[in-house]
Image (spheres, helix red, strand yellow):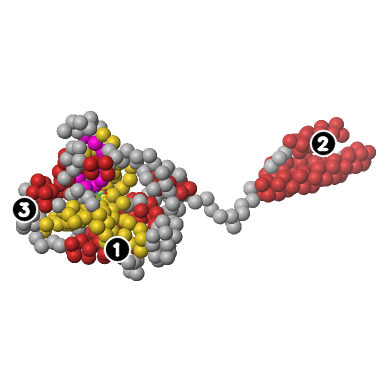
Amino acid sequence: MLEQLKELHTQALDELEKIDDPRDLELWRVQYLGKKSRLTQTLRSLAALPLEERRSVGVRANEIKRALQSGLTEKEKILAEARLVLLEREKLDVTLPGRLAPTGRFHVITQALEEICDVFRGMGFQIVEGPDVEWDYYNFEALNIPQYHPARDMFATLWIDSEMDKKARLLRTHTSPMQIRVMEKVRPPIMVVVPGRCYRYEATDATHESMFYQVEGLAVDENITLADLKGTLFEFCRRLFGEQRKVRFRCDYFPFVEPGVEVAIDCLACSRGGCRLCGYTGWIEILGAGMVHPDVLKKIDIDPEVHCGFAFGLGVERVPMLRYGIEDIRLFYSNELRFLKQF
Ligand code: PHE
């Protein structure tokens, strides 16, 4: 009997040693200390034993019971502590800021293009687009800039074919070739704006990129005058840059318009006091424009005695540069996400 109790004792302690889960511990308790456990049974049936044996077995069984009970309490404490450590490690700080899922956005230039086109759409212009790879004819020839004309120097060109070739292809240096493509296709009245990429063979610096965007505008009808051009661009400048904007028109030269003008707005930063943004002139040039040259109209069989029109070209990058005080045009196209994410 004592032998059996001893075996029970070591077995119970061995098993207890290995337990690391409260549920197993409960099973263990039931098995070794529960009502139906061998130990309890033994203690209950002591009365049936002969006197001599009753004493020694009783003492031993009670010793084992106490040992198992204290083992149980000890184990409970260890498991509880382990659980606390685990909880501590898994603790969730619900006040931490969440991890935001990255969301996409439109490029700041795309946003500017949309906004510019929206203003013109609101005035009744239609949006059309043309090819980046253009024929010499559309980019120069038809716009009154024949081969060897000095005005070609205004546009440092990226040629695809030999410059000498009359049918040479190039990367368009401005969106003006679309004036010709549109007038070839549709008869007046015409009111279109053309957003698009342009390319120039130029060293890049803070204000020059070899690829940039323009928005071209063209309106052709009977009785269109310089006043229409002024009114349109005046309104455009104010819608884009604010109601208080002053708009300045001055003579300029482009071979495909006559007269040609350059359009400037009063500096947003210094309101004409003079600052770095406007090069201390108080004015910022944002558009080239003019009345479509009669020779250009004649080339595509539009009679300049009947129809006339105006055209303009706008540098798109200038808009966010002015608005946000961005001083380097190259930032737009260097894929610098820390810059782009701001818009
Ligand atoms: N295409 C000209 C440029 O890129 C701008 C312009 C467009 C001027 C239309 C007059 C009329 O400089």
The quarter holding residue 133 reads top left
Relative to residue 34, is residue 174 drawn left or right? Answer: left
Indicate the position of residue 69 as horizontal and vertical percent values: 81, 45
Cα distance between the residues tagged 1 and 2:
104 Å
Q: Amino acid at mark 1?
A: Arg
Residue numbers of the magenta segment: 169-178
Instruction: Pick the quarter of the image with the C terminus.
Output: bottom left
Say if 96 sits above or below 54 in the image: below
Residue 108 position in % (x across, y down)? 38, 51
Can residue 218 be seen here? The reply is no
The outermost residue toward the right is 52
* Between discs 3 and 1, the one toward the N terminus: 1
Residue depicted at 84% across the width and 34% down the height: 6
Classify mark 3: residues with Cα within 10 Å, few (<14), some (14-19) or many (20+). Answer: few
State the CA–CA distance, disc 3 to disc 1: 31 Å
Q: Position of residue 144 (x, y in %)?
A: 16, 45
Coordinates of residue 127 in the picture (x, y in percent):
21, 53
Are there few (<14), some (14-19), or many (20+) residues within 10 Å of tag 1?
Answer: some
Residue pointed to by mark 1:
248
Q: Secondary structure at mark 1?
A: strand
Q: Which residue is mark 2?
A: 9
Tell me which residue sits at (88%, 42%) in the image: 63
State the SS at label 2: helix
In the displayed structure, 291 sits above or below 5; it is: below
Left/right of residue 23 with respect to residue 306 in the rendered view: right
Q: What secondary structure is found at the residue carrying circle 3?
A: loop
Which corner quadrant of the image does residue 239 belong to?
Answer: bottom left
Which residue is the site of mark 3? 303
* Residue 87 shows up from this direction: yes
Q: Name the residue type under label 3.
A: Asp
